[in-house]
Amino acid sequence: MIQAIRETNFIAYIETEANRIDTSVTSAHIRHLVKFTNDLDGKEFYAYASTELIHNRYTELRFTYGVADLYEGILKLIPAGYYKYELYEVSWIGAVTMSLGNAPATETDVLLPIAITKGVVQGLVAIGILYLAEKAGSEEVQYTEYEAPTSTNIIYYGQ
């Protein structure tokens, strides 16, 4: 489970190397497309990480909060709550270029004409849950604590 706070940057550590699909290229030619689906309304958000570091067993994905940009790893997840995530492996034969027309925008996106500079979605490598907590002091629902009276409160029944 990924845990994050709304309106802040967050880092996700996800095991990807055990499920790696395209082993013919180095990790420098791999990026991961993440699909976040809100549990409440089903709205989908796609993003590549702003920074992605592939280690021996896991991948570190850094996301930035702001005006959404699929290729720059900038997300604006609203509302707070639970999101399902799906992580798709995308590989390039040539140089990795994170831009429209060179990196797939969704898991079903096929970039034509085929070229070594265009990424190909290899498949699903991880699924899980993101819990997006609300920022302290800015919760949608806020409660005020009841102050106990200093005198005795007596309720008479049937009088």
Image (cartoon, rainbow, N blue to C red):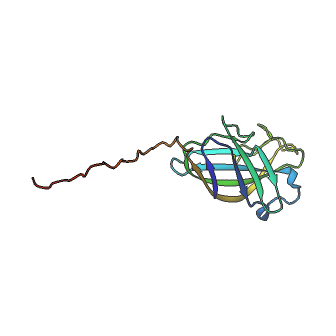
Taking the spot 26% from the left edge, 49% from the top edge, the residue there is 151
Residue 5 appears in the figure: yes
Q: Position of residue 72 (x, y in %)?
A: 75, 39
Taking the spot 86% from the left edge, 43% from the top edge, the residue there is 115
Q: Position of residue 77 (x, y in %)?
A: 60, 43
Furthest residue toward top: 67
Instruction: Indicate whether 101 appears above or below 53.
Output: above
Give left or right: position of 70 versus 78: right
In the image, 29 versus 67, the foreground residue is 67
Taking the spot 84% from the left edge, 41% from the top edge, the residue there is 97
Which quadrant does the N terminus fall into?
bottom right
Give left or right: position of 58 versus 38: right
Task: Determine the image quadrant of residue 69.
Answer: top right
Instruction: Indicate whether 136 appears above or below 154.
Output: above
In the image, 32 versus 151, the foreground residue is 151
Q: Position of residue 84 (x, y in %)?
A: 60, 54
Taking the spot 72% from the left edge, 53% from the top edge, the residue there is 88
Instruction: Indicate whether 58 appears above or below 120.
Output: below
